[in-house]
Amino acid sequence: MASLTLSFFLSFLFLFSPALSTNSEGNALHALRSRLSDPTNVLQSWDPTLVNPCTWFHVTCDSNNHVIRLDLGNSNVSGTLGSELGELKHLKYLELYRNEITGKIPKELGKLKNLVSMDLYDNKFEGEIPKSFKKLKSLRFLRLNNNKLSGSIPRELVKLSNLKVFDVSNNDLCGTIPVDGPFATFPAESFENNRFSGPELQGLAPYDFGCGST
């Protein structure tokens, strides 16, 4: 009898484990919603009482009810991002471009190891590009252009061998431009309208050369 009860309990856990695992993702997205001003109600369907967020508009899930895509590009939202986005462990596409989002880019985005594309361009992000982005080994597209980012490009990013598109134009970045790894192929337009001192000359100048000037 005890073994039958245990078997039923384990079956129950297995049956509902996808819902339980995505609940933390729903909580993370609901926390994001609380940070954002949404004058056109694009987030109206984000109901935290549902089992998971897979029926919410602008959210895409895989067959296991894990959130793999967040599409809020050009949605007229403003506010800030928080550390809770790091809980979207299965996320592949983060599309937040052309909004009025301010503040720093959370370092917790570096936890999103399945991320393929991050589009944060045309916002009002400030501060530095997080060094934690070095963990995003699957990343192919990183577009941070048209913000207010400062500091230098983290040299750790040269190890992102899958990176195909990198755009930080129209910010307030400084230092030198990396030349190793994928950076050897990025066009000059990806770096224009910043305060860069030019391409990195290894051994001749520190990579943050010029960051002390205004």
Image (spheres, grey):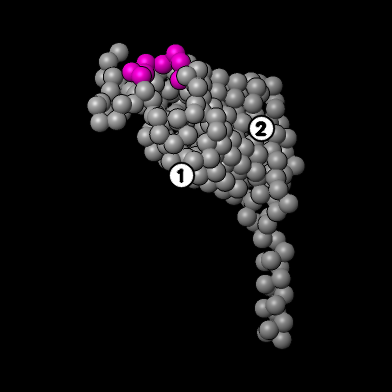
The label shown at residue 71 is: 2
Q: Residue at the location (36% across, 19% down)? A: 198
Q: Indicate the position of residue 20 as horizontal and vertical percent values.
A: 64, 56
Queried whether the magenta region covers residue 159, the answer comes back as no
The quarter of the rendered structure image containing the N terminus is bottom right
Report if residue 67 is visible in the image: yes
Q: Is residue 48 placed above or below 206 in the rendered structure?
A: below
The structure residue drawn at horizontal position 61% and vertical position 31%, both measured from the top left corner, is 95
Rendered image quadrant of residue 74: top right
Mark 2 residue crowding within 10 angstroms, few (<14) / some (14–19) / many (20+): some
Q: Residue at x 62, y 55 (%)?
A: 21
Q: Secondary structure at mark 1?
A: helix
Q: What residue is pinned by disc 1? A: 135
Residues shaded magenta: 191-198
Residue closer to the observer: 78 or 171 = 171
Task: Determine the residue located farthest toward the left in the rendered image.
Answer: 204
In this view of the protein, which residue sits in the foreground, 112 or 164? 164
* Residue at the image point whose x is 68% and y is 84% from the top: 3
